[in-house]
């Protein structure tokens, strides 16, 4: 009899978190944008600021620390796409055997309905995987108390210069 009562209560208890999220006015937002990492040329937006003794001989760049202030745009073309903001933070070459980065960055929105708001992203980026997923760990403004995930897909990568354009899809609860 007690087991039957528990089975009847389980669906009700499972619905409580979903109902409380809906009642609190929590929103779900999807944003697609492009991240432009420019390491070459006269005006780079990503600059290496530290390296380990093994970085120069590592096949993965292991130990390199890069500071970024990368443009975020609505489309993949940096010159013709509408600017949305900047990605500011760092990435570290953290993989010895695979090109993988520890990403720690804020997407700072400087235009449109999210102007003045930020999204904090942190996680592992295995650069040559087709899709990489990182955690959205916070935000400010419209995205205060944000959580969710970001999916990154390389749009273009110039292996000679290191410049890259990456499509980001942000799935945000806030």
Image (cartoon, rainbow, N blue to C red):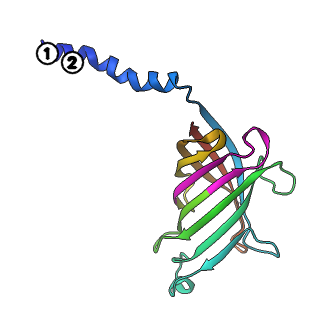
* Range of magenta residues: 106-124
Q: Which disc number belongs to residue 6?
A: 2
- The quarter holding residue 144 reads top right
User: Could you say where residue 127 lies in the image, as x and y percent from the top left?
Assistant: 57, 62
**Residue occupied by mark 1:** 2
List x then y, in percent, for residue 2. Answer: 13, 15
Q: CA distance from mark 1 to mark 2?
A: 6 Å
Q: Residue at x 15, y 17 (%)?
A: 3
Work out whether 68 lies above or below 120: below
> How many residues crowd mark 1 within 10 Å: few (<14), some (14–19), many (20+)?
few
Comparing 167 with 120, the one in front is: 120
Could you say which quadrant of the image residue 17 lies in?
top left
Query: In the image, is 24 to the left or to the right of 45?
Result: left
Residue found 68% across the figure and 43% down from its top: 32
Point 76% across, 71% down: residue: 44
Is the residue 12 above or below the residue 112 in the image? above
Task: Tell me if residue 79 is in the magenta stretch.
Answer: no
Tag 1 secondary structure: helix
């Amino acid at each position: 009899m007690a087991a039957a009562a528990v089975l009847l209560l389980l669906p009700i208890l499972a619905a409580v978190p979903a109902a409380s999220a809906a009642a609190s006015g929590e929103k779900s937002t999807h944003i697609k944008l492009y991240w432009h990492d420019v390491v070459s040329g006269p005006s780079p937006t990503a600059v290496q600021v530290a390296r380990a003794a093994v970085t120069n001989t590592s096949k993965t760049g292991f130990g390199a620390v890069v500071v970024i202030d990368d443009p975020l745009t609505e489309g993949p073309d940096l010159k013709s796409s509408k600017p949305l903001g900047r990605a500011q933070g760092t990435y570290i070459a953290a993989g010895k055997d695979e090109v993988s980065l520890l990403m720690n960055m804020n997407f700072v929105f400087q235009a449109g309905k999210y102007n003045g708001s930020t999204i904090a992203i942190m996680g592992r980026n295995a650069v040559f995987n087709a899709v990489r997923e990182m955690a959205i760990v916070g935000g400010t403004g419209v995205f205060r108390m944000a959580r969710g995930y970001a999916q990154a897909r390389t749009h273009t990568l110039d292996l000679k210069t290191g410049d890259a354009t990456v499509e980001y899809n942000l799935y945000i609860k806030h």
